[in-house]
Image: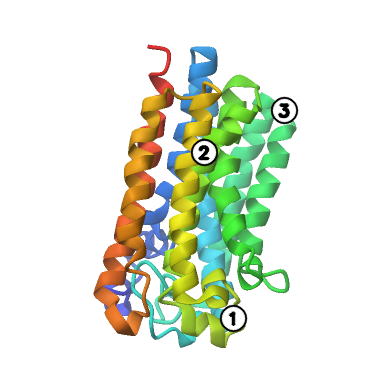
Amino acid sequence: MEPSIAALGGRSPGRVIKRYLLATRPKFLTASVLPVLLGTAAGFAMTGSVNAEVFVLALAATVFVHAGANVINDVFDETTGNDGINEGRIYPFTGGSRFIQNGVLDVGQMTRWALLLLAMGAVAGIGLAAVKGLMVIGFGLVGIGLGVLYSAPPVRLSGRGLGEVAVGIAFGVLPVMGAAWLQSGALTIGLFLLSLPVGLWVTSILVINEVPDIDADGQSGRRTLIVQLGTQGGRLLYIALQLAALAATVAAAYVGMVPLWAAIVPALIAGGAFVAGGGIVDPGEDAVRLRKSIEMTLASHAIGTLWLVIAVATKGL
């Protein structure tokens, strides 16, 4: 069910907390939690220990920035006309949180909430910088920049066919390598290869989530890759991303970041991409099949990343 005033309105503390918490789309915050876990596991594999304080601060900073980006993206997608005209959405996966459109929170409230969340992420980042040095600030600025500029005009990366790359970096390369560097002080080609499957899997989520929104995005001038390629081209892109994730895992094994058996689950995911990719059709043609493909893609990202966490953490055992 989409959010409603009947379900979430009211001034009681419980209703207010629930309203603002759900506006962050908490079910999807695993996209920032799991890469941090993988990077931390890689740091553990490299050093044999984990700095718990650094891990907690890194996790808090990443989650707060992700939550803030979710909320501010809802604001920009309302002001640029995307979500208001989106009739093909498959809630809760596409079309935004619907908090603004359904009158649960207004643009001003969502903007203030987003800024508070981003500020909380910045505070956690400052704490990390105090422990690990100013390079943390660089990681943080890139993360916040990608999260905000994804939908913020006039840059609006999502409208230029660059949003998919931005998401792959922001929820793959950046948090995995950043978390690993915080624990080990190293930035290596192996870590980069390890981060690629996660970035490619999360990009696959974005690509398939763009399918139900294709009409609204096209009407509002948001030229996502799905708008540019169409469903047939999007299907090929989706499968290519999953195959590339498998190739990156094999490459990470080749340089010793993970054992070769780590490629088993990515191989299964790549095989399943031909099934899930078949669901990339016009929402009016088979919305049920498309929803199942979206759910399968989300599960593949979570299972695949957790599998890599296990593979990395147990490599030396």
Q: State which quarter of the image contains the N terminus.
A: bottom left
- The spot of residue 97 in percent (x, y) is 41, 70
Question: Does the rendering let one see residue 208?
Answer: yes
Give the structural element (helix, strand or loop) at label 2: helix
Q: Nearer the viewer, mark 2 or mark 1?
A: 2
Dot 3, how many residues are within 10 Å of its Cα: few (below 14), some (14-19), or many (20+)? few
Q: Disc 1 and disc 3: Cα gap in Å?
A: 38 Å
Mark before the other along the chain sequence, 1 or 3 = 1
Residue 134 against residue 212 in the figure, above or below: above
Mark number displayed over residue 250: none
Give the structural element (helix, strand or loop) at label 3: loop
- The spot of residue 10 in percent (x, y) is 33, 73
Residue 256 against residue 116 in the figure, above or below: above
Dot 1, how many residues are within 10 Å of its Cα: few (below 14), some (14-19), or many (20+)? some
Mark before the other along the chain sequence, 2 or 3 = 3
Give the structural element (helix, strand or loop) at label 1: helix
Residue type, mark 3 in image:
Gly
Which residue is disc 1 drawn over? 79
Mark number displayed over residue 133: 3
Which residue is disc 2 drawn over? 248
Q: Disc 2 and disc 1: Cα gap in Å?
A: 38 Å
Q: Quadrant of residue 167?
A: bottom right
- The spot of residue 265 in percent (x, y) is 33, 38
Residue 315 against residue 80 in the figure, above or below: above
Residue type, mark 2 in image:
Ala
Mark before the other along the chain sequence, 2 or 1 = 1
User: Considering depth in this image, is 280 or 309 the residue closer to the camera?
Assistant: 280
Tally the marks. Answer: 3
Q: Residue at x 37, y 70 (%)?
A: 280
